[in-house]
Image (spheres, rainbow, N blue to C red):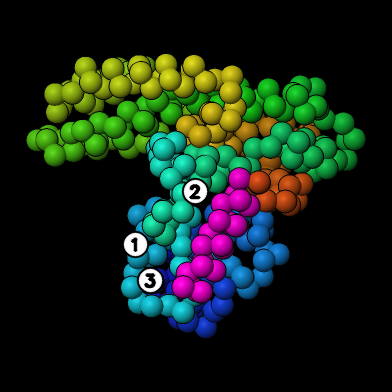
Amino acid sequence: MSGYKSLDELEVVLRSGAGIAIICEGEDYREDEFFYKEWFGDLGRMVTFHAQDGWEYVQDAVKELRRRGTPVPVYGLLDRDFTPDEEIARQSEPSFEGYCYRLPRYDLESYLLDPEGWLGVLRRVLWRREGRVLEGWDTVQGVTDRIRGFYREALPIAAHNWTAQRLAELHAGQPNFVGRSYLTAVQALASVNAEDVLAAWASAFGAQETAREVYRERLAFLRAREDDLDELQKHVSGKLVFQELHRTIPCAPKRQRPQRVDLAERYLDQRREPPPELAALLHRILSRAERERSG
């Protein structure tokens, strides 16, 4: 059963609300909605966050709630996913008319990967009683190197998913086309060659060589940026990296590994301040909402 409200339920909530409403991704409150509330809870009734599962549902909810004339301005916050830099930059222009904004980084999880925050989790949670942290994870530089390594390991997955999305754009209307699911774990390609897998899939609709070419080009694009963490955070899913961090972060002997969501909450205990990019984006939305009200 889903943990997010129907549009009718949302409308009732917003009709008795104040400030502005932001519809975000995530099936229930322990996903994106939870993190936004933790970071921006000090805004109180100025802004409320409400989850809808998936970017299409967010867009539909914003459109429909605005059509119904809710008394509070309604906006959407979406993961960046495959959105190019030009579209992200357009959101900052005064002429931008859309009501849904994309994150500057690939997804929300990309903002849960600050090395200092994870060193704090290691010291204050996972190895607190021992008074020391396993070597290699015991410095900011050590944790930074691990996170960079996870990003590099995720490059073939990111290139695979980009190729699946790109070929869907090019060939979705052709006979025998069947969409390919995105890969969601670094280990998904552990025993297979991504290029060959994509070519085999695309052969059904006559695009095997295109699949190979698109994959190679995207992988080359990513590898040219593998030393630039800011760039990787735009183009590689933070979910992939966070999963690897959760899977490999060392726990003290006889201590049970926390669930992924619980570990993320421990991270927030160390990093209460909202990431500057998200704070700037929310300020932009709030300013626009104020203009909307006064207009």
Q: Amino acid at mark 2?
A: Ser
Q: How far is mark 2 from mark 3, CA to CA?
A: 22 Å
Nearest the eye: 172 or 130:
172
Give above or below for 266 relative to 141. Answer: below
The mark found on residue 66 in the picture is 3
Residue 41 placement, left or right of 194: right
- The one of 99 and 49 positioned closer to us in this rendering: 99
Residue projecting furthest to the right: 131
Front of the two marks 2 and 3: 2
Q: Position of residue 212 (x, y in %)?
A: 28, 17
Label 1 near label 3: C-beta < 8 Å?
no
> Disc 3 or 1, which lies upstream in sequence?
1
Which quarter of the picture shows residue 179? top left
Q: Residues within 10 Å of mark 3 (few under 14, many from 20)?
A: some
Inter-mark Cα distance, 1 to 2: 22 Å
Task: Check disc 3 and report its element: helix, strand or loop.
Answer: helix
Label annotation for residue 223: none
The residue carrying pointer 2 sits among few (fewer than 14), some (14 to 19) or many (20 or more) residues within 10 Å by Cα, namely: few
Residues 127 and 83: in front is 83
Locate residue 76: give its quadrant. bottom left
Q: Amino acid at mark 1?
A: Asp
* Residue under pointer 2: 92
Q: Position of residue 220 (x, y in %)?
A: 42, 16
Task: Name the front one of labels 1 and 2.
Answer: 2
Q: Which residues are magenta?
A: 277-295
In the rendered image, residue 177, in percent from the top left (x then y), is placed at 16, 35
Residue most toward the left? 175
